[in-house]
Amino acid sequence: DGGITQSPKYLFRKEGQNVTLSCEQNLNHDAMYWYRQDPGQGLRLIYYSQIVNDFQKGDIAEGYSVSREKKESFPLTVTSAQKNPTAFYLCASSMQNSYEQYFGPGTRLTVT
Amino acid sequence: AQRVTQPEKLLSVFKGAPVELKCNYSYSGSPELFWYVQYSRQRLQLLLRHISRESIKGFTADLNKGETSFHLKKPFAQEEDSAMYYCALIKGTGNQFYFGTGTSLTVIP
């Protein structure tokens, strides 16, 4: 079954703990993205990566970190420095020079 | 700076009526604009992009540079069109997308 997967679907953490969200794709896409979705704010780009071992900050990268050691994987770590981590997180991928992004099902993170 | 604006959070129309979802953008270069859609319990997916000038599921969108708009239109709404619609703009060569806040469309039977 090809596509882009995110796990887990729901994640709960205590304040002050780092947490890593998984994003995997088997579409052989070069580019991968992380978005945060909050009510009334649409999707906001956190980080994106166009190639392995390279990534760029989006508009709201503070308090987040990523790695891109493999083409298929682009994990996002929400650190304790992120002031409002509770949100819905979407991962996406696309072919290089393609404008169509394929989205994962999302992970809802709740930090208390 | 808000690059993509969707002024309507919610929009309801009757089946068979025309529908228009508004999108305005601010960008100094030549924009690439898109509409993405999320149906209930499905993933966000591309609906159409201005560069292809295509009609998908009866929807069309014309880029109006003078009004900086990219409104999505359909002459006769169907119940299956009920979904969340996002307008998006791509900036530069980095494939960095900017999404609007979305419009939830409900088509009333």
Image: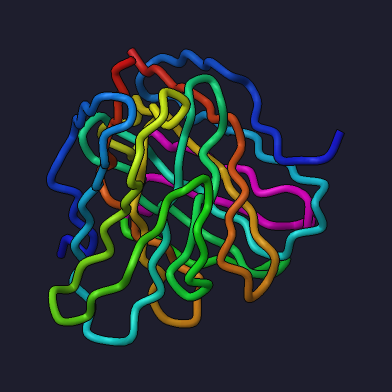
Task: Give the vertical position of A22 relative to B71 (above or below).
Answer: above
Residue A57: give x, y in percent of width and height: 43, 63
**Residue sitting at x 72%, y 65%:** A30
Position of the C terminus of chain B, as image quadrant, is top left
B14 or A56: nearer the viewer: B14
In terms of depth relative to the viewer, which is nearer, A27 or B79?
B79
Instruction: Report the quarter where the N terminus of chain B lies.
Output: bottom left
Q: Which percent across, then down, holds residue B43?
A: 56, 33
Q: Position of residue A58 (x, y in %)?
A: 39, 61
- Give the residues drawn in magenta, as a range: A60-80
Q: Is residue A73 left or right of residue B27?
A: right
Q: Nearer the viewer, residue A101 or B8?
A: B8
Give the color scheme: rainbow, by chain, secondary structure or one colour: rainbow
Residue at 62% across, 48% down = A102
Task: Please tell me which residue is depicted at 56% across the width and 27% down the height of the picture.
Answer: B42
Asked whether, in this view, residue A52 is left or right of residue A42, the answer is right
Residue B79 lies, with reference to residue B94, above or below; the image says: above
Q: Is residue A26 magenta?
A: no
Rendered residue at 65%/31% (across/down): A6
The question of residue A76 being in magenta is answered with: yes
**Image position, residue A41 (x, y; %):** 23, 40
Say which of A42 and B86 sits in front: B86
Residue pushed farthest right?
Answer: A1
